[in-house]
Amino acid sequence: MNTPRTTLYRDKQNAKIMGVCSGIADYTGVNVLWVRLLTIGALFLTSGGVFLVYLVMGFLLNKKPPHLYSADKEETQYWQGVRQSPKRTAREIRARMKDVDRRLSDVETYYVNSNPRLSAEIDRLR
């Protein structure tokens, strides 16, 4: 199941030619300069075979939707993490939620223990 945030797009806003390298950089979280240098290196190593792949990707990939350009840096990094390792991201979210639950429980315990009237009311409800 691909959502708009986990799909590979051509990034026309940061593009030099067709936006394929900038789209790959956005998708993977790698600096676009390294993706471009790798593409140029592969172009020489494969005697131009990468050029054909680049053109095919340029015509087949959709343009990045405009609403995805407005994301802040933290959100962009989050979605890159989801694309790279969904299981790890789910574990991190579970750990954060457990921490929030633990802290909320501590607040509830403190409030109930420091308020005898509330404690008596809870006991009456049981």
Image (cartoon, helix red, strand yellow):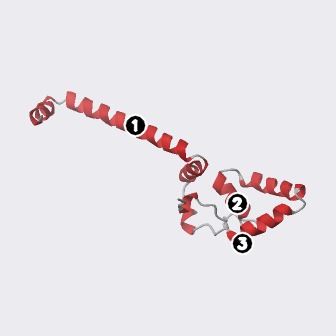
Give me the residue at 67% from left, 68% from top: 61
Q: Is residue 15 left or right of residue 87?
A: right
Give me the residue at 82% from left, 61% from top: 50
**Up/down of 98 relative to 55, above or below:** above
Q: Nearer the viewer, residue 77 or 84?
A: 84
Specify the quadrant that holds the C terminus: top left
- Secondary structure state at the residue bearing disc 2: helix
Q: In the rendered image, is residue 104 in sight?
A: yes
Tell me which label, 1 or 3, sits earlier in the chain. Answer: 3
Tell me which label, 3 or 2, sits earlier in the chain. Answer: 2
Furthest toward the left, the residue is: 124
Tell me which label, 2 or 1, sits earlier in the chain. Answer: 2
| Alpha carbon separation for disc pair 1 and 3 | 45 Å
Q: Nearer the viewer, residue 28 or 111?
A: 28
Residue to which mark 2 is pinned: 22
Splitting the image into 4 quarters, where does residue 69 fall?
A: bottom right
Residue 75 lies, in percent from the top left, at 53, 52
- Secondary structure state at the residue bearing disc 1: helix
Residue 65 lies, in percent from the top left, at 58, 68
Splitting the image into 4 quarters, where does residue 49 fall?
A: bottom right
Give me the residue at 72% from left, 63% from top: 20
* Label 3 packing within 10 angstroms: few (<14), some (14-19), many (20+): few
User: Which amino acid, by three-letter code, is at mark 3?
Assistant: Phe
- Secondary structure state at the residue bearing disc 3: helix
User: Which amino acid, by three-letter code, is at mark 1?
Assistant: Lys
Q: Give me the disc on residue 98.
A: 1
Residue to which mark 3 is pinned: 59
